[in-house]
């Protein structure tokens, strides 16, 4: 069966510090991978998606970047965090666009 | 900008009551999904509907996709405290899903 792992679960970082959130998928190959950010108790905003190694599409201009160094690994990064980067970050995978998403358990990021 | 609006935003009901949550858009979707999310967790897929007018049932939950594939509803019969959570719809207009604004449901025992 397929599983998705996302870590860390919570993170408190000072303004200006770097960020690296990691997401890995097991039990499947060539998944579509996504990073979302969710405002408190509300809908999800797509940040990045990837259909293959090294292929990253950015949905919104921001202080973040994403990379896919391996088929089942997706990383969300920032060189210098802003207060506005605080939020709940979710990684997800799908077989293709017609299938549902399986989400990771999320990372609560607080920038102080 | 394509939007998926959900209503109501918040709903608090007593155990045993019925409820309906709506997901509306001006865009046509090739498929639509419903998710439930609990605090501090990622959303969990409940159902995917792809055909206009399609109705799917999942125990006490009934999902309907509008005939024109622009809207959907989720009906819960005899709600239970375990149904509490954030319900999100997500529509596929082209190559990626867009998520609705969410309905936060609280079922009181």
Image (tube, rainbow, N blue to C red):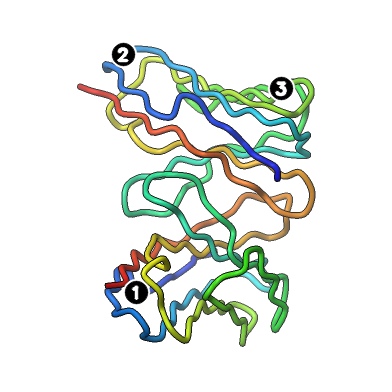
Q: Could you say which is closer to the camera, residue B40 or residue A57?
A: A57
| Residue identified by numbered label 1 | A8
How much space separates mark 1 and mark 2, taking CA atoms? 38 Å
- Between marks 3 and 2 in the image, the one whose residue lies nearer the viewer: 3
Picture coordinates of residue A90 (x, y %)?
47, 62
Q: Residues within 10 Å of mark 1 (few under 14, many from 20)?
A: some
What residue occupies the far left of the structure in this picture? B109
User: Upstream in the sequence, badge 3 or badge 2?
Assistant: 2
Residue B66 tag number:
3
Which chain's residue wears label 1? A
Please give the name of the residue rendered at 32% of the width and 48% of the height, measured from the top-left corner. Answer: B39
How much space separates mark 3 and mark 2, taking CA atoms? 26 Å
Picture coordinates of residue A28 (x, y %)?
62, 70
- Rendered image quadrant of residue B55: top right
How much space separates mark 3 and mark 1, taking CA atoms? 39 Å
- Between marks 1 and 2 in the image, the one whose residue lies nearer the viewer: 1
Please give the name of the residue rendered at 49% of the width and 67% of the height, measured from the top-left corner. Answer: A4
Please give the name of the residue rendered at 49% of the width and 18% of the height, measured from the top-left corner. Answer: B20
Q: Is residue A57 left or right of residue A4?
A: right
Q: Residues within 10 Å of mark 2 (few under 14, many from 20)?
A: some
Secondary element under disc 1, as helix, strand or loop, is: loop
Picture coordinates of residue A92 (x, y %)?
55, 62
Q: Are marks 3 and 2 on the same chain?
A: yes
Q: Residues within 10 Å of mark 3 (few under 14, many from 20)?
A: some
Which chain's residue wears label 2? B
| Residue identified by numbered label 2 | B16
Residue A83 tag number:
none
Q: Is residue A31 above or below residue B53?
A: below
Specify whether residue A1 is in view: no
Q: Are marks 3 and 1 on the same chain?
A: no
Q: Are marks 1 and 2 on the same chain?
A: no
């Amino acid at each position: 069966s397929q599983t998705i792992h996302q870590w860390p679960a919570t993170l408190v970082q000072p303004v200006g510090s770097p960020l690296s959130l990691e997401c890995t998928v097991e039990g499947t190959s060539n998944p579509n991978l996504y990073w979302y950010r969710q405002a408190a108790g509300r809908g999800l905003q797509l940040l990045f998606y990837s259909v293959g190694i090294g292929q990253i599409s950015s949905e919104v201009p921001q202080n973040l970047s994403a990379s896919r160094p391996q088929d089942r690994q997706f990383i969300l990064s920032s060189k210098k965090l802003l207060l506005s980067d605080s939020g709940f970050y979710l990684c997800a995978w799908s077989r293709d666009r017609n299938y549902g998403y399986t989400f990771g358990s999320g990372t609560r990021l607080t920038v102080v | 900008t394509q939007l998926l609006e959900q209503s109501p935003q918040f709903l608090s009901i007593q155990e045993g009551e019925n409820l309906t949550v709506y997901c509306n858009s001006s865009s046509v979707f090739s498929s639509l999904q419903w998710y439930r999310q609990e605090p501090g967790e990622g959303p969990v897929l409940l159902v995917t509907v792809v055909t206009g007018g399609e109705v799917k049932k999942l125990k006490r939950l009934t999902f309907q996709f509008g005939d024109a594939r622009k809207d959907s509803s989720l009906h819960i019969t005899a709600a239970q405290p375990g149904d509490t959570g954030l319900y999100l719809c997500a529509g596929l207009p082209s190559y990626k899903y867009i998520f609705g604004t969410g309905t936060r449901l609280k079922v009181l025992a």
